Amino acid sequence: MDAHDIAEGRARWQRRYDEARKRDADFTTLSGTPVDPVYGPPEGADVPGFERIGWPGEFPYTRGLHPTGYRGRTWTIRQFSGFGNAQQTNARYKMLLGAGGGGLSVAFDMPTLMGRDSDEPQSLGEVGHCGVAIDSAADMDVLFDGIPLADVTTSMTISGPAVPVFCMYLVAAERQGADLRVLDGTLQTDIFKEYIAQKEWLFPPEPHLRLIGDLMEFCGKEIPRYKPLSVSGYHIREAGSTAAQELAYTLADGFGYVELGQSRGLDVNTFAPGLSFFFDAHIDFFEEIAKFRAARRIWARWLRDVYGATSEKALWLKFHTQTAGVSLTAQQPYNNVVRTAVEALSAVLGGTQSLHTNALDETLALPTDEAAEIALRTQQVLMEETGITNVADPLGGSWYVEDLTDRIEAEAEAIFQRIRDMGGDGTITAGILRGIEDGWFMSEIADSAFVYQQAVEKGDKRVVGVNVHTGSLTRELDILRVSHEVEIEQNKLLGARRAGRDNALVEQRLAEMVAVARTGGNMIPSMLDACRAEATLGEICGALKDEWGIYREPARF
């Protein structure tokens, strides 16, 4: 790009920056030196390829979605939390919100993630242990008691039974008297990544995709601010993928959901802004920053050139980030505070919209209140003390960062082509489904995880406290333990609710929902009616399993 084009781009950015809202804040260094909102090539410079870097708030959005960067609005502090029963988690939410958290992110226990009730035989010993137990809309009432859902953005990390859990959330909001049209938040819903990495599915892929399509239609018409689908790379990375694989598989899943929306006759300019993403921030600082920058650029180009989007918001890749749980170590756990801070900083320099920071004890158990507070304060120190919110994309133009961004993008594009070729019809969706059926994704991730583990065991990749600097004075941590009494009490409560509801009405509503499943109608209204009658999660998912069957992963050796 020649000097004239660069100067024109800077002028465009300046106009948009001047018109945008900015926070009332001190944009100087610690020493009091004023800093510019963005930096670029010196006046008169020719920079070949600068159109791929550009300016914040301008296609291809390598440097961020908004001309102001974090001067306009800082990222949302959204701590992922949930344990025990709804009452215990409600107390943790109130603590986080009271300490300065900006939104909620719900962690569910394993029975809930698998669409089971707490009293099913398969739930034994798992209730409340990796998140909160939710059996019916009444649990959602307790979970959000005293927390006005119309005023708080709420993210829910669940995919297999995401739609019935979302309906329970809507019922809880109705019971609070909230106008559903103003609800704001994100539902994960991403079933592709379950088949690829996390393995928390209920049905074969096609029924899951049908429910996701119904949800996209329903939210587009009824709850326009809510994001019905968060495409998740986090679990792909935690399973052992490389940064480029995480990026490529995640964006490919996103393209698959765009194709799903278009197959429903939805306008990409209308539904694409409701898609969001969820990435891992791992420990390799600059690689992660490059990954986030490449993600925005790829998404914008594909949405415009492949899927025909013309709206600016449809081209925006909005993402939440969580620091890498897999990078945490049980050995010398206080080192995890440092790892988390570095990973959080990479997410911020990469332009994340919201962020969760892991607690130092999460490799051992659910976090204690003290560990959760340290994780929260880590974000607040970054936001309030370091000056990183003053300048948009401060690493833009770095030879190293730009080269890494280009290389990760090229790796991702090669993977997209491989996925398209697997499908045979030119669509990403067909390639994803074939890759799932053949075990290709799982094999590729396993190979990457094996290579990394070998490097750690040989000492080529160093992990402090594990294979280097192993001497320590640290003592054993006090960890949070979920009492077995939680499961006993949850099951008693569930039994009492079943006894006190209109069971004939529940059976009628479940039958009506299954009847809609046999047609081309949207299933969300009938599922909402079942939740209003206090049908349980296990009953709803069980009725659909009877109708659609369950999915079993083919055996591979």
Image (tube, helix red, strand yellow):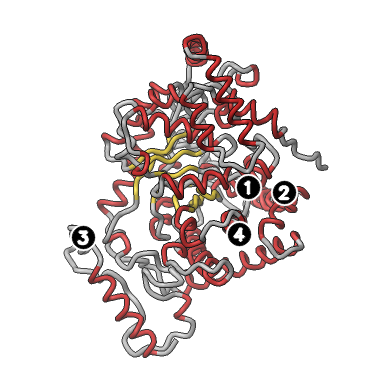
Please determine whether, in this image, residue 304 is positioned above or below residue 282: below
Callout 1: SS: helix
**Which residue is labeled 2 in the image?**
436
- Residue 14 in percent (x, y) is at 27, 76
Question: Which mark is on residue 192?
Answer: 1
Q: CA distance from mark 4 to mark 1?
A: 13 Å
Query: Which numbered disc, 3 or 2, marks the residue that appears first in the sequence?
Result: 3
Q: CA distance from mark 3 to mark 1?
A: 46 Å
* Amino acid type of the residue tagged 4 in the rendering: Ala
- Residue 545 in percent (x, y) is at 68, 30
Callout 2: SS: helix
**Which residue is labeled 3 in the image?**
30
Q: Which of label 3 and label 2 is nearer to you?
A: 2
Q: Nearer the viewer, residue 267 or 413?
A: 267
Q: CA distance from mark 2 to mark 4?
A: 15 Å
Q: Nearer the viewer, residue 306 or 357?
A: 306
Query: Which numbered disc, 2 or 1, marks the residue that appears first in the sequence?
Result: 1
- Residue 471 in percent (x, y) is at 50, 38
